[in-house]
Every structure is written in C-alpha cells, then in structure tokens.
C-alpha cells in the first residue's frame, strides 16, 4: 500500500513538472528600446574568414542598398528572422512541436520537441530543421539543414551553418507598472565556411494578443530578373572549404 502511494506521488509530481514548462503560444510583436529585456551584447562586426571577407568586399563594391533582397521578396529565413520586425509572430505550441508563423514574408517554421516522433530532414530550407528540448524553463533549439543565404549585408550563412537558440519567458513592468510578458531569444550561429568564430544574435518579443497576423504577399522572381538586368552575380559559396 505504501509503495503504491509513493508511486502515485511520483507520477503526480512528474506530471506536474512536465506541465510547468512554459507555453510560448500566442501572438507576439518585436520588442526594442526602453522597457524591453536587456540581453547580453550581440556580435557587432561579423567575423568573416579571409575567403568570406573577400566575397563580402566584392559584394559591397557591386551591390548598393537598393539591391537589398528584402525589397524583392527574398525571405530572410534564419538567423535573420530571429523575430521578423516590424511584423507580428504567432506561436502555437503542442506536446510534440512548436509552429511559428511570421506575418513578414509569410514565413513558417516548425520546431520538433525531443521525445516526440519527427521526420528525418530531407532538404535545406530557409528555416532549417529544428529540434528543441527544455532545460528547466529554457527551451534550447538546435537547427541544421539551413539553405545558404549569400546576401553579404544580411548575416549570410552557408548550407553548413548550425544554430543554437535559448528561449526564455520573462515578465517586466512597463512605464505604468503593469507587468508585460516577453519572450527572449539568445541565438548562436556557427558557420566555419564563413566565420572564424560563432556569431551571437539576440532578440525579444512582447506578448501582444491584439496584434493579429495579416496577409503578406510577395514574389521572389522579381529579384532574379532585377539582378539579370543589372548584370549582377551573387557570391558562390561552393568553392569555400
């Protein structure tokens, strides 16, 4: 009898701990400036290796700000879409995965949670293949299978890049003393093809249930046509070690 009671107590405790993990579901909006969580400094100058620095310099010499891919509907993907300002993000969390939808460029991401069934990765994509696990209240996400992003002013990455994120939920008072809920992300990009050391990127979201996702329509083909008209060639990462 005592043994059975102990077993029941352990099961109840384990269930309670499992459900104490934070639920990131909801509508969120990028948070900046006063009142936003203060995170450790991000990398300010990208640590390009010699080969990548040469590609960067050639890119900057040929491409001006009017050539920015964002103006031509090229989806930024990770790590550039750490939150997707200035548009809202919707998160739906289940026991087995987390879905994210960005209004900006209508991007979609799935994060599989460890211990639940998931498919094997097949293709390199803008958001990559992400698997997360909880370390206490922190969600740690490891991402691989990222598609290369050769736009050298936009934190480029090769298809060898990997990312580790750490999500946390925090509450902070606003100027009126009202508690506001924030989701913070501390991201580390590792890409030895391009960088001599990992690149640190940080961002925060503020819970914003009254900011719904609106339709965002774009097309990538116009940028390819534009580059052809200008005689511009994007950097080729295939020859990098």
Image (tube, grey):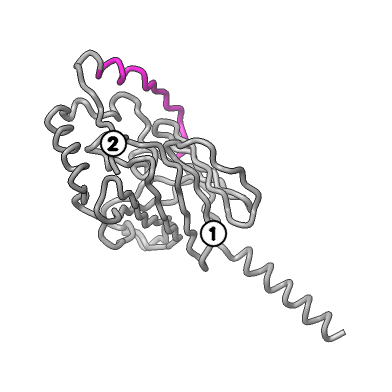
Q: Residue furthest bottom?
A: 2
Q: Position of residue 21 (x, y in %)?
A: 57, 63
In the picture, measured across the screen, residue 150 lies left or right of residue 216, that is left
Along the line of sight, which residue is nearer the eye, 84 or 77? 77
Q: Quadrant of residue 11?
A: bottom right
Along the line of sight, which residue is nearer the eye, 37 or 120? 120
Q: Residue at x 33, y 49 (%)?
A: 191
In the picture, measured across the screen, residue 52 lies left or right of residue 202, that is left
Label 1, label 2: how far apart the Cα atoms are: 35 Å
Quarter of the image containing the N terminus? bottom right
Q: Position of residue 63 (x, y in %)?
A: 17, 28
Within 10 Å of the Cα at label 1, are there few (<14), some (14-19), or many (20+) other Cα atoms? some
Within 10 Å of the Cα at label 2, are there few (<14), some (14-19), or many (20+) other Cα atoms? few
Quarter of the image containing the C terminus? top left
Element type at marker 2? Answer: loop
Q: Residue at x 51, y 66 (%)?
A: 135
Q: Is residue 222 magenta?
A: yes
Q: Quadrant of residue 197?
A: bottom left
Q: Which residue is mark 2?
A: 239
Vertical relation: 89 (above or below) 181: above
Q: Residue at x 24, y 29 (%)?
A: 68
Q: Given contact means CB atoms under 8 Å apart, are the residues at marks 1 and 2 in contact?
A: no
Q: Position of residue 146 (x, y in %)?
A: 42, 41
In the picture, measured across the screen, residue 199 lies left or right of residue 230, that is right
Q: Position of residue 196 (x, y in %)?
A: 24, 53
Q: Which residue is mark 1?
A: 133
Q: Residue at x 53, y 62 (%)?
A: 134
Q: Is residue 204 magenta?
A: no
Q: Which residues are magenta?
A: 211-227
């Amino acid at each position: 009898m005592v043994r059975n009671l102990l077993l029941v107590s352990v099961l109840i405790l384990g269930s309670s701990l499992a459900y104490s993990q934070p639920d990131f579901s909801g509508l969120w909006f990028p948070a900046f400036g006063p009142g936003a969580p203060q995170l450790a400094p991000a990398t300010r100058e990208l640590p390009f290796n010699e080969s990548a620095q040469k590609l960067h310099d050639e890119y900057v010499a040929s491409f001006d700000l009017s050539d920015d891919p964002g103006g031509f509907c090229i989806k930024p993907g990770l790590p550039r879409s750490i939150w997707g300002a200035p548009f809202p993000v919707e998160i739906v969390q289940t026991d087995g995965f987390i879905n994210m939808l960005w209004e900006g460029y209508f991007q979609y991401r799935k994060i599989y949670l460890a211990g639940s069934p998931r498919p094997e990765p097949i293709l390199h994509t803008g958001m990559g293949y992400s698997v997360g696990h909880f370390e206490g209240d922190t969600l740690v996400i490891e991402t691989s299978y990222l598609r290369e992003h050769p736009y050298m002013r936009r934190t480029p990455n090769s298809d060898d890049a990997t990312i580790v994120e750490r999500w946390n939920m925090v509450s902070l008072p606003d100027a009126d003393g009202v508690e506001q809920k924030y989701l913070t992300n501390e991201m580390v990009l590792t890409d030895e093809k391009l960088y001599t050391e990992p690149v640190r990127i940080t961002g925060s979201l503020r819970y914003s249930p009254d900011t719904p996702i609106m339709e965002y329509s774009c097309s990538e083909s116009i940028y390819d046509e534009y580059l052809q008209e200008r005689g511009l060639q994007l950097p080729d990462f295939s020859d990098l070690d």
